[in-house]
Image: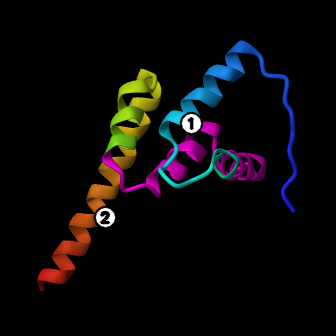
Amino acid sequence: MTEIMSLSVTPEAYKVFQELRRVKPEGTSFSKSVKLIVEEYLRGNQTAFECAFENILLSSDIEVWQKLINAVSVEDFKKIQLKTAQINNLINKRVEKCLK
C-alpha cells in the first residue's frame, strides 16, 4: 500500500528536489528516484552524487544526460568525465574481443 508523506522542505532542499525532478529518467517516479539514491547512500557505498549518477545511467534518454552535464558543478562534471572514460575503456576492450 502506498503512503503519502509530507515534508517540510528548506529552500536549499527544494532546489535539490527540483534538480532531481529535472534529471530523473523518463518513466521513473520521483519517489522511486529518491528511494534508489537514499538506499545506496545509507549503505555507505556511494556519495549522494554517485547515487544520482547511477540512477541517471539507467536512462538512455540523451536529454537527461544533456541536462545533467549542463547543470552539475565543475567537481561533479570531472567525476562524470572520469566515469565515462572508464566506461569507454571497457567498451573498447569488449570491441577488441568481439573483433577477434
Dot 2, how many residues are within 10 Å of its Cα: few (below 14), some (14-19), or many (20+)?
few
Marks 2 and 1, the one that precedes in the sequence = 1
Question: Residue 81: horizontal and vertical position, in percent?
Answer: 34, 39
Q: In this view, does 21 lie above or below 92?
A: above
Question: Residue 91: horizontal and vertical position, in percent?
Answer: 26, 65
Mark drawn on residue 90: 2
Q: Is residue 90 above or below residue 38?
A: below
Question: Residue 22: horizontal and vertical position, in percent?
Answer: 50, 34
The image's colour scheme reads rainbow
Which of 28/84 is in front?
28
Quadrant where the N terminus is found in the figure: bottom right
Amino acid type at circle 2 is Leu
Query: Which stretch appears magenta?
Result: 34-62
Residue in the image at 31% along x and 47% along y? 62
Identify the residue position indicated by label 1 in the image: 21
Q: Is residue 50 above or below residue 10?
A: below
Q: How many marks?
A: 2
Q: Is residue 54 left or right of residue 45?
A: left
How far separated are the C-alphas under marks 2 and 1?
A: 30 Å
Q: Which residue lies furthest to the top in this view?
A: 11
The quarter holding residue 11 reads top right
Question: Residue 93: horizontal and vertical position, in percent?
Answer: 24, 70
